[in-house]
Amino acid sequence: MDQSLFTYDIVAEDPKTHARAGVLHTPHGDIPTPIFMPVGTKATVKGLPTETVRELGAKIVLANTYHLAMRPGADLIEEMGGLHTFMNWHGPILTDSGGFQVFSHGDAVKLSDEGVRFIATDYDGSHIFWSPEDNMAIAQKLGSDICMQLDQCPGYPAERSYVERAVELSSMWAERCYRAHTRPDQALFGIVQGGMHLDLRLRSLAHLESVGDFPGYGIGGYSVGEDHETMFETLEPLVSEYMPLTKPRYLMGVGNPTTLVRAVAAGVDMFDCVLPTRTGRMGTAFSSEGRLNLRNARFARDAGPIDATCSCPVCTGGYSRSLIRHLVTQKEMLGGILLSQHNIHFLLHLMQEARAAIIEGRYADFVSSWMSGEGAADY
């Protein structure tokens, strides 16, 4: 990796919390942090053209290595000019390792020191083996700005011995990914695992730091079945006391507004989640009133916008709660599209507000205001 292409500047630190505002520089553009990253699993943020995602304020999007490797295949994407060209997104892109999706296959997965063998039950039922080197070869063909090491993500609850083995495997694979990754215009992030055990988290982090100079760190293995208070028992000390100060910290797969607000206070910089689009397709909206189920009959004659305080194109464009309820109950695709736009904008705007509060030194008040408001009822 060309270190000069991937630098992280911290521009402000909040005086009363561990929150910080920064800029992550990449070959395809700068990423202001804290940031929420919309997920485009199969080279698309579901239902939304890339120009719409840009207009909503997204600075970086994600794509999924497992799904793209299965269809249409990394070789085809490389042949088509790489992922930026293929998905018509010319800003920064992060690709995850696909490990979470692989391990979601459950009993169809066999682990070894060498790698992971699994059955692609959600595609053609083929038997596939991935080593860390295989995973890096796919990531480099895709050509994202940031890729993630292959890791094992244990669910919750899990026996400590199982989590310990996941840390051991993830650490071993991180070392091999680091050696195998050679693309200079792509950054490789390590991933801290360890479940809800702080000592295992610290063991994982120490090994990653001993492997080499990762330009950033993912924090995996949260939001996998535990409640939010259980998550923060280890997340807060891990991030605020132990993670490197000069590297971006990426909390993987977490996307409800309150968790973002609290995690930023602990010092997290980057987030991603399918939640805004997935719940949008189910008829659910984030709002300053908390999470809203637009299928509810109380919205049938509500002429107001989803959220009167929201500046997104849906809330300012004349789309009423009544109309959106009609669309989602009748399974009209526009309902999910409009709610996806609103939910993505809501999280992007929330992080813009958080960044401004950090720069102005008032993030503690920002957190207090959010937690005392109706919007915090978002679980």
Image (cartoon, grey):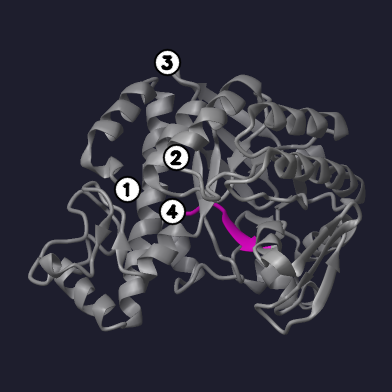
Q: Indicate which disc residue 378 carries.
A: 1
Residue 94 against residue 65 in the figure, above or below: above
Part of the protein shown in magenta: 57-64
Going by the image, does 11 lie left or right of 99?
Answer: left
Q: Is residue 18 visible?
A: yes
For label 2, the crowd category at 10 Å Cα-Cα, with few meaning under 14, some 14 to 19 and many 20 or more, is few
**What's the CA distance linking mark 2 and mark 1?**
12 Å
Q: Amino acid at mark 2?
A: His
Distance (Cα) linking label 1 and label 3: 25 Å
Sequence-first disc among 4 and 3: 3
| Labels 2, 1: front one | 2
Find disc 2 in the rendering and name its residue: 228
Check if residue 167 falls in the magenta segment.
no
Q: Residue at x 17, y 61 (%)?
A: 305
- Label 2 to label 3: alpha-carbon separation: 22 Å
Q: Nearer the viewer, residue 125 or 362?
A: 125
- Of the image marks 2 and 1, the number of the one nearer the N terminus: 2
**Mark 2 → mark 4, Cα distance in angstroms:** 27 Å
